[in-house]
Amino acid sequence: MSEFSLKGHDTIALNDLLKITGLCGSGGEAKAVIAKGKVKVNGQVELRKTCKIRNGQVVEFAREQVTVTL
C-alpha cells in the first residue's frame, strides 16, 4: 500500500490520481480501466472517471492500493 498526499488541495480526480501515482501510464488508460470497472474506491467499484477523491479514501487497482492523505 502506498500513500498520495493532496498537498493542500481538497480533492483529486480519480483518473488523475491513477496517472500521477503511476498505476496507469496515461490519462486515457486511466479512463479506460475506470470505465471497465477495474478500479475500486473504498472497496466499491467506481465508474465515474473524474470522481473526486478525498482525504482518507483508498483507491485500488491492479492489486495495488493508494491511501489519500492531506
Image: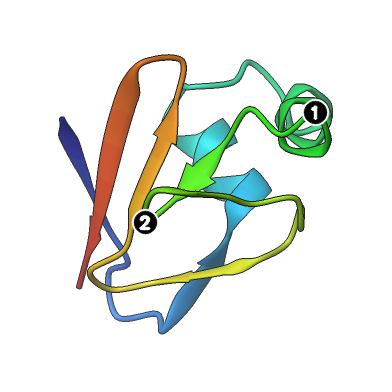
52 or 16: nearer the viewer: 52
Q: Return the disc, 2 or 1, that comes first in the chain's sequence.
A: 1
**Image quadrant occupied by the C terminus:** bottom left
Q: Which residue is mark 1?
A: 36
Which labelled disc corresponds to residue 57?
Answer: none
Residue 36 is situated, as x and y percent measured from the top left of the image, at 80, 28
Q: Amino acid at mark 1?
A: Lys
**Image quadrant occupied by the N terminus:** top left
State which quadrant residue 31 falls in. top right
Q: How is the image coloured?
A: rainbow
Q: Residues within 10 Å of mark 2 (few under 14, many from 20)?
A: some
Residue 24 is situated, as x and y percent measured from the top left of the image, at 59, 20
Q: Which residue is mark 2?
A: 42
Left/right placement of residue 56 relative to residue 11 reads: left
Residue 17 is situated, as x and y percent measured from the top left of the image, at 51, 46
Left/right placement of residue 5 relative to residue 62 reads: left
- The residue positioned 64% from the left and 52% from the top of the image is 46
Under circle 1, the secondary element is: loop
State which quadrant residue 3 falls in. top left
- Mark 2 and mark 1: Cα distance apart in space: 17 Å
